[in-house]
Image (cartoon, helix red, strand yellow):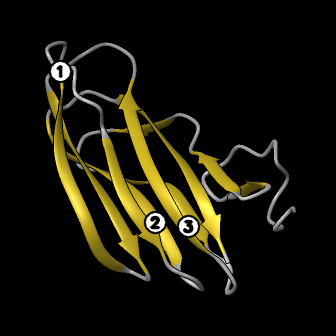
Amino acid sequence: MMLGGSNPAGTSPTSLNYIGNHAYAFSGQQISGSGTTVTMLDLSISANNYIDATIQFGFGGARSNDDERVEIYVDSELVAANVYNNNYERAELNDFQVILPPSSRIEVKIVKVSGTGDVPSFAWLRGRVYQ
């Protein structure tokens, strides 16, 4: 059963896509430069569904030992955040396990905490939709 939503092939910071009882979204490349906050994903959850989701993110380009903080907001309320260092030594998975409630607006932002490099950043969401 298709639950509705945007085009299943959509890729943008505002596209939440559905295939059956699965949802996904991709931010595309966003640049977190010195002193900036960038919205990676800005999504709306429908009134009839909630999503058990994994939100992941990564960094590209040259490593610069900069620090970026990833923040997750539900209806403008900060619900999760973590600071990550953009260096070669990290091997951990960058993810958050979250429940996205019905009728909510979800924002995933990246904040440049330290450093001066323009860091290509990416975010993606994968989740199971429940009615």
If you read the primary sequence from the N terminus, does the residue marked by circle 2 or circle 1 appear first? 1
Mark 1 is on which residue type? Arg
If you read the primary sequence from the N terminus, does the residue marked by circle 1 or circle 3 appear first? 3
From the viewer's perspective, is 100 left or right of 26? left
- Quarter of the figure with residue 120: top left
Which residue is label 1 attached to? 90
Mark 2 is on which residue type? Glu
Residue 88 appears in the picture as rendered = yes
Q: CA distance from mark 2 to mark 3?
A: 14 Å
Which residue is label 3 attached to? 51
For the N terminus, give its image quadrant: bottom right
From the viewer's perspective, is 59 left or right of 68? right
Mark 3 is on which residue type? Ile
Q: Provide residue 84's location: percent of width, then percent of height.
A: 18, 38
Marker disc for residue 107: 2
Count of numbered badges drawn on the protein: 3
